Image: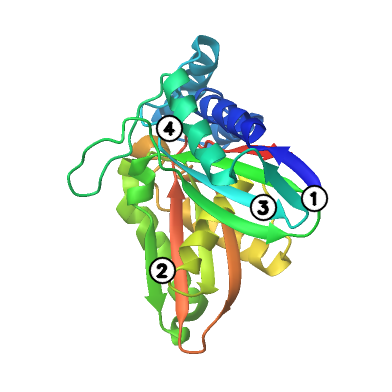
């Protein structure tokens, strides 16, 4: 049995919230540089250069790379031989998020859905739990802005719609998102499960970042096909036209009911902010 203190979780979540918002990952930096090589539009190239410059300034000045510092999702993989001591894991995550937004001087964007009264500390976070074997505890801290999330979609397709139907709704979702979701995108696609699991599959796909490989060769081929089709649309960086509308597409899939074909599309903006914490 492995003991992990709630205070340690709180501290690491606090640090992750701040770092995610002010410091671009090496993978995302490389993705921008690769996009700059692929982009053919002059204005598209200039925009990518500005995104790189923006990321460098944010890291140097220790300020958010985007004014929308997001609502925080946390994906938890917890081994059945792990015990949280001196507190609960949920309270530790909440406290870490609260402290991160306060101590990092990050914008608080969480509010009551009807009165719109701000909670003033960016809590509660959205926490997803998965129990696994062993003594492992892994957290993915994932602040995500409202613009891209608002353009994400769930579709309950007919089984006969098949792969062509899936491609159609993914492309239509990207077209509708356009400039308002701040491209170039990373796009997560969840196929199968049911009404509640397809969106979760899509969002978890984003954890792979711009270069994460799919372990299923068939799904990897589908991802490449979608990416090629998306980048033919011509939305381009920040919607100003160009070849690079998306940096990558990731698919997660699971079995579904014989009468259903759930498909979720989760669009992520260029400010892809995910920190993985291993205990």
Earlier-in-chain disc, 4 versus 2: 4
Which residue in the protein does label 4 denote? 44
Place of residue 205 in the rendered image (x, y in percent of width and height, measured from the top left): 58, 55
Q: Residue at x 34, y 42 (%)?
A: 146
Which residue in the protein does label 3 denote? 77
Q: Secondary structure at mark 2?
A: helix
Q: Nearest to the eye among marks 4 and 3: give it.
A: 3
Q: Nearest to the eye among marks 2 and 3: give it.
A: 3
Seen as rendered, the residue at the extreme bottom is 258
> Above or below — where is 71 with respect to 213?
above
> Above or below — where is 10 with respect to 140?
above
Earlier-in-chain disc, 1 versus 3: 3
Which residue in the protein does label 2 denote? 168
Q: Secondary structure at mark 4?
A: helix
Label drawn at residue 135: 1
Earlier-in-chain disc, 2 versus 3: 3
- How far apart marks 1 and 3 lie (CA) works out to 10 Å
- How far apart marks 4 and 3 lie (CA) works out to 39 Å
Place of residue 241 in the rendered image (x, y in percent of width and height, measured from the top left): 37, 40
> For residue 93, what is the image quadrant?
top right
Q: Secondary structure at mark 3?
A: strand
Earlier-in-chain disc, 1 versus 2: 1
Q: Residue at x 41, y 42 (%)?
A: 124
């Amino acid at each position: 049995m492995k003991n992990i203190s709630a205070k340690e979780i709180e501290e690491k979540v606090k640090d992750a919230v701040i770092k995610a918002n002010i410091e671009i990952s090496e993978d995302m930096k490389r993705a921008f540089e690769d996009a700059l090589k692929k982009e053919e539009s002059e204005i598209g190239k200039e925009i990518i250069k500005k995104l790189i410059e923006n990321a460098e300034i944010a890291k140097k000045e220790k300020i958010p790379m985007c004014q929308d510092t997001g609502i925080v999702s946390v994906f938890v993989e917890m081994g059945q031989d792990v015990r949280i001591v001196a507190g609960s894991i949920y309270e530790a995550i909440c406290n870490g998020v609260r402290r991160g937004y306060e101590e990092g001087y990050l914008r608080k964007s969480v509010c009551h859905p009807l009165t719109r009264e701000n909670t003033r500390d960016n809590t509660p976070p959205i926490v997803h739990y998965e129990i696994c074997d062993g003594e492992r505890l892994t957290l993915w801290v994932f602040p995500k802005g409202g613009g891209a999330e608002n353009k994400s979609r769930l579709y309950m397709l007919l089984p006969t719609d098949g792969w062509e139907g899936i491609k159609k709704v993914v492309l239509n979702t990207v077209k509708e998102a356009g400039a308002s979701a701040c491209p170039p995108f990373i796009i997560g696609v969840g196929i199968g499960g049911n009404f509640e699991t397809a969106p979760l599959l899509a969002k978890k796909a984003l954890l792979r970042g711009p270069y994460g490989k799919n372990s299923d060769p068939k799904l990897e081929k589908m991802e490449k096909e979608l990416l090629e089709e998306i980048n033919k649309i011509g939305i381009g960086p920040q919607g100003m036209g160009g070849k690079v509308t998306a940096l990558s597409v990731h698919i997660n899939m699971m079995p579904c009911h014989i009468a259903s074909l759930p498909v979720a599309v989760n669009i992520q903006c260029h400010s892809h902010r995910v920190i993985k914490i291993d205990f």
